[in-house]
Amino acid sequence: MASSARVTQPYRKGLTDGLIVMGHVVAALMLREMKTRFGRHAGGYIWALVEPVMFIAALLLFKVATLGSGLQDANAVASLAAGVVSFFLFRDIVQRALTAISGNRGLLMHPIVTPLDIMLARSLLEAATSLVVTCLIAAGIFVLWGEGLPAAPLALLGVLAVAAGFGLSLGLLLGAAAAVWPVVERIVAPLLRVGFFISGVFFTPASLPPELRDLLLWNPLLHITEAARAAWLSVPIETFGSLTYAIAVAWLLLPLGMLSERLARSWMAPA
Amino acid sequence: MIALEQVSKRYRARGEWRHVLREVSAVFPTGRNVGILGRNGTGKSTLMRLIAGAERPDAGIIRRDVRVSWPMGFTGGFQGSLTGRDNARFVARIYREETVFVEDYVARFAELGPYFDMPVSTYSSGMRARLALGLSFAVDFDVYLVDELPGVGDARFNKRYAEEMAARRSRSDLILVSHQVASIKAQCDMAAVLHGGTLTLFDDVAAAIRLYSKL
């Protein structure tokens, strides 16, 4: 009975009409998010760049100190950068989608705005930010090392798109779950931190013992960071990952995420 | 036209389930201003949110083929860290209204002065309410949902609000929720009584008032 209960909208009639309205709403939400997050202080923008740079620098110093690798190797830096930007993009999208509803309940008093719109707008903004940050980091590496620009930029763009898509699919699912069970919001943050350690940000699958490697390769993120690395580096590397696997998981999760967002809408009443 | 078809809605208050609507069917025809009378706690605001499309019924369908406003006094949709102007622009964009027109209209109507360009979080509750009212008038809705408003402005503002409401009534419809008979008598040409999970719709206001006064 509950599934037939509904309020019809004059705004989204056919599919084309609905998509046009959605486009307008998502664009308006992106502008709103941009002003809210980065708006009156430049701090928001700067942090988006500083955080990954700090991680790359810290991981680089760690490698130099423990493994005795040299600082002069641009490929070592690029390898770290590839892992950091692709993993952070995924992580940030999951986090933003997760809090999209709890932070915007009042918005849902405008039924023209759907929870999906809010999550999509946030994800697109995250992806755009990540793209700019990636370009700046690549430029920074080139300035400091004289080489290390992404060897296959289009392939890298594709990998980032997969990372974003995977993040959105999972974010939809978790965001819907968080609307029903608020505790989900607090569980996911530590899980994402664990994810950082098993997703190949600072190690490559090639450097792992085979048993551990086979276990960790269930994690689609490991495949994403591997593909990002392969696209960025100009030297061939021994890869174990397959981007196809990550894409398949993201595609399987997407309908689940969209379905759960629908089902959870009853719990998403405006405050 | 807004039509309720076998709509049920209940909510939990202090551990008890309360039925606001129990399989209610009703039609709010286009061209009529409808008043909804109900004692405190009967769920008038919940009914408003249902009609606004902000909440889903537990069962039944609410059909709306017109642009319905949000409950006019609602101020929870603002982003506190953004200015009144930015919030106005956002609302204009989602409803695809001219942003410049909406900004100008709201600035004139809400009379926030320099506060229009300050974060909404610095506003008093009265200023927020004026911003929200200005915005709902600035968007061209077919039906305006009016929840009885507490005093939000000075006498001058209240006069402007009453004038704007009267002007709007002549080209759009109104659904007005109140427990005051006088305001419904003055503004509506049709009325309903919400009581104990049923909504009884009357074609003339006097009949609704007779039932309401017997409750």
Image (cartoon, grey):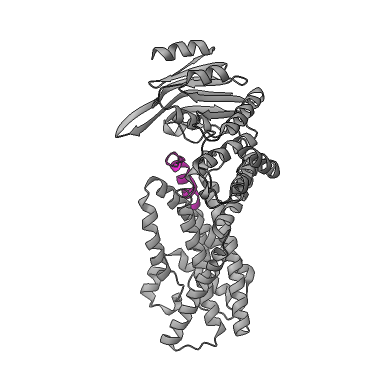
Does residue B175 lie above or below B104 as drawn?
above
Q: Which of the 4 quarters of the picture holds residue A18?
A: top right
Does residue B162 lie above or below A232 as drawn?
above
Q: Which of the 4 quarters of the picture holds residue B175?
A: top right
Q: Residue furthest left?
A: B15
Which residue occupies 51% across, 17% down? B191
Which residue occupies 42% across, 33% down? A2
Total numbered labels placed on residues in the image: 0
Q: Residue furthest front?
A: B155
> Is residue A226 part of the magenta span, yes or no?
no
* Percent coordinates x, y for residue A107 in the rendering: 52, 43
Does residue B2 lie above or below A223 as drawn?
above
Which residue occupies 56% across, 68% down? A46
Residue B204 shows up from this direction: yes
Q: Quadrant of the C terminus of chain A?
A: top left
Residue B142 shows up from this direction: no
Q: Main secondary structure of the magenta part?
A: helix
Does residue B156 lie above or below A105 as drawn?
above
* Percent coordinates x, y for residue A132 in the rendering: 61, 67
* Percent coordinates x, y for residue B215 in the rendering: 38, 15
Write down the region rendered in magenta.
A253-271
Q: In terms of depth relative to the viewer, which is nearer, A207 or B27?
A: B27
* Percent coordinates x, y for residue A150 in the rendering: 61, 75
Q: Quadrant of the N terminus of chain A?
A: top left
Q: In terms of depth relative to the viewer, which is nearer, A271 or A201?
A: A271
